[in-house]
Image (tube, grey):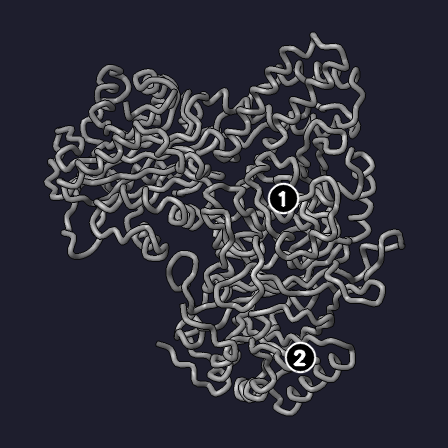
Amino acid sequence: MPNKNGNVYGLTLLSPIIDDEKATPSHDLQIRKYLATLPTGEGSPFALAPGTHLARLVVMDDVIYVGMPACEEHLKSKYLVLESNFDGELDQYLNGLADHVPEHLDAIWGHCFGYPGVANRKAFVEYMRACQLETTFFFAAVNDQSVPQTLRALHTRRAVADFIACHQGMEPAQLQAEFMQFVKELGSEPIPRPGSIGVVRNTKTGGRDE
Amino acid sequence: MSKLNATDIQGFVLRGYNLPLARYLFLHFEDACRARALIGRLLGEVTTGQRWDGGKPDSTVNIAFTHKGLVALELPLATLLTFPVEFQEGMKKRAGILGDTELNGPERWDELWREDRVHAWLGVNANCPEALESRCAQMLALMQETGGAVLVGSQDAAAVVIDGKPTTGEHFGYTDGFGNPEYLGVERKSQPGQGKLMPDGTWAPLATGELLLGYADEAGELPVAPVPHILASNGTFMVYRKLHQNVASFRAFLDTQGALYGGGREKLAAKFIGRWRDGTPLELSPDEPDFPLTQDPKRSTNFTYGKDPEGVKCPLGAHIRRVHPRDAFGFNGRLIDRRRITRRGLPYGRFVPEGEPVSDAEDRGVIFMALNASISRQFEFVQQQWIGYGNDARLGNDKDLLIGNHCGRGKFVVQGDTTKENPPFICSNMPNFVELRGGEYFFLPSITALGMIAMSLVDPR
Amino acid sequence: MSNINGKVYAMNAITPMKPWKTWILRGFFFVLGHVKPLQKDLVNLSFIEFARWVVLPRKRFPFLGNGQVKEDLRYDYLLFFSNFNGTWNQYIDAFSAVLSRGLNLVWRWSEKFPGSVPVTPFKEYIARVQFDTDYYYTAYPHATANDLKSAHIVQASFDKLSQRAQEYSPAQFAEAYLHFVLQVQAHLGETGEAPVVF
């Protein structure tokens, strides 16, 4: 089914934004302002809630007029787009967001028509599903590794490259001993947090250059 | 396609002259009117692309302008604004994009390039010192007579001479001069491996428009070019970079790493570049050099990487594999056809053979000049994405070993196999073997365009 | 507001389609989704992390009532969301160079699409139909699609060796280790900052 590719779910939400002449600034501008200061790294709501590989939020003002002979037309509402690529199933993801970052969800979607708030969990999930668009075709370069697995693999790769570089030409018994030690240490290191730029490894990899 | 009019194109664009000596004069225009008069006088001197049926001349002259130079010549503003953004900004402002930071940053460049005084490049090539001196003297005399320009700097360059004969060698000991692309209509002996790869495995010349403005390019259109057409056609853009070479550091690095590498010092040197020092491509002869191969144009550049996807013969990050990936990215090489550049240029500074004492501080290196229809799409892309970065080659942030701006960090992986002579090997924390000492972007106009500039006939559209 | 986070770029595009053409496009996507070899080129252009197309019929814009006015449109819309590595120019250059037929099959049903070759009018069209991202998050900003694939290969090889490392004699280990290095030697690139965009 097209919303999924392997273990990754491609969620596309289009939420109509409240149009109220009396609001100053308008609701879409308020969303924009909120998004402009929202952290995009480790402090992102998508980092704090589990499962998100990549996600974006876009205030879509209008459709685009491509020029004559195409007809000019306009949307009656602006829409908030959420495009997210995450591990697992939709309900579990939405509940994860509601559990971990309820204040952000309310602050952002509170500007949209019909948004019930996370407090009423059932209504919240129904609302999100009502905004969902069916993805027609979803492509994923890697579709079978979760976010924690990915972060761990990236960390391992860096550590392995360092280890190999520092252990060239070593005689087998010592190499084996140091490798076992390396496995132990790597296993006990924390994985980098989602949205971060990686962990600075203080653990020495041993070998010639230490 | 239309036949090229060689008399309208500067010779420097169409061929490397193979003259062993050069002096590059850098000019500054003080007054537009006198500068134009100088260009008018130079018109008779500029070497065109015409064939030398009567034998090679003793010396050649070519000219190119920076954007500031075109401004000083008072081309119309509307015309000046149609030049590409990167050319208008100049190479110094593009330092961040090119990775020319820290040891390669403009603060460390030669004074000539730190300032913004260079308006024109006058390239004089010659076959002997007397011819070089007399031609340069003639140029200076013209400058004096017309009052058209002031000399703000000059750079000598010369082919490395070994046993009394000029060679295509360079200071690290490699044989250079193999890698120039072929373009449709540019007369040259055809050589497999220089053009673009066709679906049936043969090689065809690249579209002319990858080198010359005004001709169809590989994207099936006329490349974006300054306006009016007649100013841009038959012209091209030139990138000039003075690359200082730290020969002592390089030799020391090769000594220490070569002692640790199972294949030995010479093989490691070959793995850095992708060719043995005599020019034999690793892809064709991974175990030892094969000098006759290098002398056979049907073979010396005729290879692809499709059968070596793991880099066991030629490392994934080797220099020639980085700058000319051929079919390494799949799609039969189509992804790289618009990323080729034509190189001219010569070494500078005293050559010191292997084994003799040498110091990084001595003034030596290579004057790197690249010709291409689009500096940003061709040179800047290769420099940023393939030299200073490695994602397309699946090497993450790893840089080119030879000219990468390492500043003591980074690594170079030599992929290998289970044999003792070809083991996997990693070099780490490299110093800069090459340091940028300055440079700029130039526009090399056609003869017609030079005439228009000289007579102040450039009209905006 | 930024379209870029670390090494990944978020492109959004919306193009109008005459409703009868939407069915042809759906047919094409159906085939593409089920005939895997057709996706080969997309996979080999290894700078896309995730990408999706969403056909949005004119009557299916979400309607939540509560004061919202219903949409009244003539066109269906094709939404395109891509998460790719590299610069905007590099991305479009690559697609135009090697995937032009596929691109045409997707976008020729959109109004005023000029074709994906030659590249300059194609770039102008994309610039016109692209709209900008307000907020962009990635769990791994310093990694590209290539880095992800390499990392998983390294992790898998490392796990295999780690599991058995204890059992080997030193000589056996040395051999197993060499094979491990050969498996990962083409996958050891560093992650880090993206080059400056231009």
Please check whether the numbered discs 1 and 2 fall on a single chain.
yes
Query: Is C31 left, or right, of A150 in this rendering?
Result: left
Residue at mark 2: chain: B
Q: Is the residue B311 above or below the residue C169 in the image?
A: below
Q: Residue furthest bottom?
A: B145
Q: Residue at x 61, y 39 (%)?
A: B316
Q: Is the residue C13 above or below the residue B152 in the image?
A: above
- The quarter of the picture where residue B181 lies is bottom right
Q: Quadrant of the N terminus of chain B?
A: bottom left
Q: Quadrant of the C terminus of chain B?
A: bottom left
Label 1, label 2: how far apart the Cα atoms are: 43 Å
Labels in figure, total:
2
Q: Which residue is mark 2?
A: B55
Residue at mark 1: chain: B
Q: Residue at x 67, y 39 (%)?
A: B410
- Relative image position of residue A207 (x, y in whole percent): 77, 25
- Relative image position of residue B39 (x, y in whole percent): 56, 84
Query: Is A23 left, or right, of B48 in this rendering?
Result: left
Query: Is A49 left, or right, of C144 in this rendering?
Result: left
- Relative image position of residue B52 (x, y in whole percent): 61, 78
Q: Which residue is mark 1?
A: B399
Tag 1 secondary structure: loop
- Relative image position of residue C159 (x, y in whole percent): 59, 16
Q: Residues within 10 Å of mark 2 (few under 14, many from 20)?
A: few
Q: Amino acid at mark 2?
A: Gly
